[in-house]
Image (cartoon, rainbow, N blue to C red):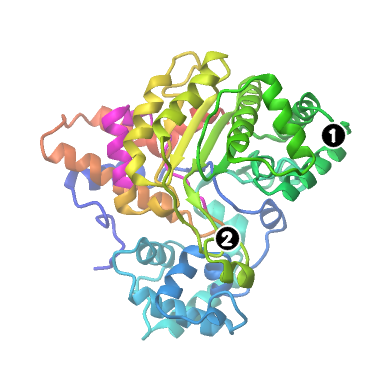
């Protein structure tokens, strides 16, 4: 029997039934990814399975380095065949790593290949994949259609023209929605020069003369309004630490002036700035009825030598810890709630030990006023946690502290057009967990409730939550 079958990763009779009858064939709403709208609009073709699989995939790059593969065969100028062989050799060593499962889910879903990739058969599998890649079924648009994708949300700077999003919006021949996500990381940046250059560009785009914080706020709203017109309904923010410091208007203005002038500011002033900017943005998101995503807890670019050699987003990031997270997170959400400017919010933490802190905190700020269930969401297992263990930890913490029925489900967080089986992976794990509860007699085998729960988490909740 093939490794990838309807029982794979589930291990529960009830779970298998839920997967087969409900989860397996549901459409996909991928509300956070890093695909490029340009690639979708132009429908770029991939020259090889190496390009499709290994270009830009820092998850695989980390594993290959751990397997003793030289950098030339990872991010360097080795031939595609050499890089693919190196990946096949790494897969053999990856038992227990989700990359092993994702690799074979993708081979099965897109290429119809049941064989397990190894150092013995890598060339045959590479050749079979490369032959298929010449077919029109392997363009980005075709891959998305084959994956039953309804909506994806890309990740976009507020300074982006959204040119290709606008073109896709006008293209009636392609039915999946490709929507932008407003991600203003450059304005949270500790890098003085990145912030000041972004401020200059913001002024150019909006026609605002920015000399005070109120000017900056007006320019930000102009970009939010522009994104909204193109179809954006979600923001996203990537942070190291999530902190909150109470501030006065004068303090906020003073820190803005220092950042505008590219002056060095203290850690305490950075915390004030993060607080000021988040409160300002939250007010805008609430006004435009957007959801706000916050990803926090990564410590990035830790290997200076490799940063200089191969650049950012190359697989040298790690999980960060943070003192007084509970106090900061509660104060952060409370400050927005006090002004009635707390939008629908999804919080993703990277350090799984904080799962119960995050899940219990968001329960303090749930409300029926947004017209959706659980407007505060504990986000899915992210980055280092999109593993079986990480997903189960997140799902159990959410079930313990909140309502699993209302969870908005999984996303790919990916740069790959063949990463949609991560949704399938999640659905199998979800059905397995629920099935185990039922088979153990912990909850009733109520088919109506169980099927609604699985359908909600895998699709319907996201559709209603984001108001696509």
SS at circle 1:
helix
In the image, residue 455 above or below residue 142:
above
Residue 349: image x %, image y %? 43, 42
For the N terminus, which image quadrant? bottom left
Instruction: Give the percent coordinates (x, y) of residue 400.
Output: 26, 31
Name the residue: 54% across, 77% down: 130
Q: Is residue 119 left or right of residue 16?
A: right
Label total for image:
2
- Residue 151 in view of the camera: no
Label 2 secondary element = loop
Q: Which residue is mark 2?
A: 313
Picture quarter with the C terminus: top right
Q: Does 437 appear in magenta? A: no
Q: Residue furthest left?
A: 441
Residue at image coords 78%, 24%? 214
Residue in the picture at 64% in, 20% down: 248
Residue 76, percent across and down?
Answer: 60, 78
For disc 2, the neighbor class at 10 Å (few under 14, some 14 to 19, many from 20) is some
Q: Position of residue 237 (x, y in %)?
A: 58, 40
The residue at 53%/47% (across/down) is 149
Based on the displayed image, in which of its 4 quarters is residue 359 positioned? top left
Q: Which residue is mark 1?
A: 206
Which range of residues does the magenta coloring cover?
391-413
Question: Is 189 or 384 nearer to us in this picture?
Answer: 189
Above or below, comparing residue 144 to residue 353 in the picture: below
- Residue 79, quarter of picture: bottom right
Considering only vertical position in the picture, is 280 above or below 367? below
Membership of 395 in magenta stretch: yes
Q: Is residue 384 visible in the rendered structure shown here?
A: yes
Q: Quadrant of residue 96?
A: bottom left
Could you tell which of marks 2 and 1 lies nearer the N-terminus? 1
């Amino acid at each position: 029997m093939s490794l990838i079958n309807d029982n794979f990763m589930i291990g529960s009779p009830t779970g298998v039934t839920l997967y087969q009858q409900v989860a397996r064939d549901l459409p996909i709403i991928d509300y956070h990814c890093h695909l490029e709208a340009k690639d979708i609009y132009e429908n770029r073709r991939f020259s090889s399975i190496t390009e499709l699989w290994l270009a830009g995939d820092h998850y695989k790059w980390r594993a290959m380095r751990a397997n003793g593969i030289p950098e030339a065969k990872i991010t360097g100028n080795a031939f595609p065949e050499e890089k693919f062989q190196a990946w096949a050799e790494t897969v053999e060593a990856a038992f227990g790593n989700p990359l092993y499962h994702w690799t074979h889910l993708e081979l099965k879903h897109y290429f119809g290949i049941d064989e397990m990739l190894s150092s013995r058969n890598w060339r045959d599998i590479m050749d079979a994949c490369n032959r298929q890649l010449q077919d029109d079924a392997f363009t980005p648009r075709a891959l998305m259609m084959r994956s039953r994708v309804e909506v994806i949300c890309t990740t976009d700077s507020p300074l982006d023209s959204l040119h290709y999003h606008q073109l896709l919006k006008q293209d009636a021949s392609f039915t999946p929605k490709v929507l932008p996500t407003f991600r203003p990381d450059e304005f949270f940046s500790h890098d003085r020069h990145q912030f000041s250059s972004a401020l200059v560009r913001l002024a150019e785009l909006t026609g605002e003369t920015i000399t005070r914080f109120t000017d900056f706020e007006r320019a930000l709203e102009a970009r939010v309004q522009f994104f909204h017109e193109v179809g954006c309904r979600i923001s996203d923010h990537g942070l190291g630490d999530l902190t909150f410091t109470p501030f006065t208007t004068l303090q906020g203005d003073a820190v803005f002036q220092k950042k505008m002038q590219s002056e060095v500011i203290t850690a305490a002033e950075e915390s004030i700035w993060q607080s000021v900017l988040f409160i300002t943005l939250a007010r805008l998101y609430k006004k435009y009825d957007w959801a706000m995503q916050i990803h926090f807890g990564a410590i990035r670019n830790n290997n200076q030598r490799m940063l200089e050699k191969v650049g950012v987003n190359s697989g040298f990031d790690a999980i960060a810890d943070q003192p007084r997270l509970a106090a900061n997170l509660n104060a952060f959400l409370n400050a927005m709630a006090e002004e009635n400017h707390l939008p629908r919010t999804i919080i993703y933490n990277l350090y799984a030990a904080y799962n119960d802190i995050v899940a219990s905190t968001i329960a303090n700020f749930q409300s029926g006023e947004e017209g959706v269930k659980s407007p505060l969401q504990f986000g899915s297992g992210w980055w280092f946690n999109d593993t079986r263990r990480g997903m189960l930890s997140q799902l159990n913490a959410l079930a313990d502290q909140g309502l699993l029925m209302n969870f908005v489900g999984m996303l790919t967080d990916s740069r790959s057009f063949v990463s949609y089986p991560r949704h399938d992976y999640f659905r199998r794990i979800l059905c397995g967990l629920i099935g185990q509860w039922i088979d153990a007699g912990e909850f009733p085998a109520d088919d109506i409730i169980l099927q609604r729960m699985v359908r909600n988490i895998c699709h319907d909740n996201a559709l209603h939550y984001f108001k696509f």
